Amino acid sequence: MDIKIRIERTEDYRKTEEVVKSAFEPEEFSDEKEHLLVNRIRKTEAFVPELSLVAENNKQEIIGHILLSKVKIINEKKAVDSLALAPVSIISEYQNKGIGSLLIKAALSAAKELGYQSIIVLGHQDYYPKFGFQPASNWGIKAPFEVPDEVFMAIELTEDSLADVSGFVHYSEAFS
């Protein structure tokens, strides 16, 4: 399968949101509003256009999307910049074919190239560790809401970038 990963363009926004909506419709834990989250994030200072990526098939149809947006990890002494991975979406007929993995690897690489140090994800405990994500609690990083420890994860893009980081993750207002 010939899949191309590229930066999302403004003219892709409507199609991307359709892909996100379609990908989450059958999901048990979805509120089916992830496409609205993507739209809201784009309107905030948390949006990093270079970290909104799409996957295209050989017909140049958008079949997947991933978004990393800015967050802060804050404790009583300091605030540290990080990124949130949310959401990653693949339309149903292309799921379980490695496209999500391609998008995640491309997003991790792009974030590192842009100088970001870490990424936070709320996701499946059996999926994200294969990319290097570990429980965020390993660094004393906590979600701003009640969530099982094993599904709230972080990854260091630069070795020891989270060594002296702890606190609560503060998401952009788009997540509220």
Image (cartoon, rainbow, N blue to C red):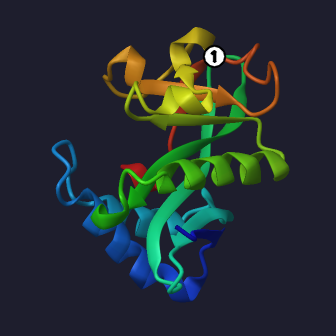
- Measured as percent of width and height from the top left, residue 130 is found at 55, 29
Residue nearer the viewer, 62 or 148: 62
- Residue 126 horizontal side relative to residue 100, left or right: left
Which residue is rendered at x = 57% and y = 71% of the image?
2
Q: Which residue is mark 1?
A: 166
Horizontal side, residue 64 vs residue 134: left or right: left
Question: Which residue is pictured at 54% across the width and 57% down the height?
Answer: 67
Rendered location of residue 41, percent (x, y): 49, 62
Q: Is residue 121 left or right of residue 71?
A: left
Residue 43, visible in the rendered structure: no
x and y percent of residue 20 in the render?
A: 35, 65
Q: Amino acid at mark 1?
A: Ser
Q: Nearer the viewer, residue 99 or 151?
A: 99
| Residue 18 coordinates in the image, percent (x, y) | 33, 76
Q: Residues within 10 Å of mark 1 (few under 14, many from 20)?
A: many
Location of residue 138 (image quadrant) = top right
Place residue 74 in its image quadrant: top right
Residue 145, compared with residue 175, is above or below; it is above
Side of 151 where 53 appears, left or right: right
Q: Residue at x 50, y 76 (%)?
A: 57
* Residue 56 visible in image: yes
- Say which element carries label 1: loop
Q: Quadrant of residue 37 in the image? A: bottom left
The count of marks equals 1
Rendered residue at 40%/26% (across/down)? 126
**Residue 17 higher or lower than 96, as above or below:** below
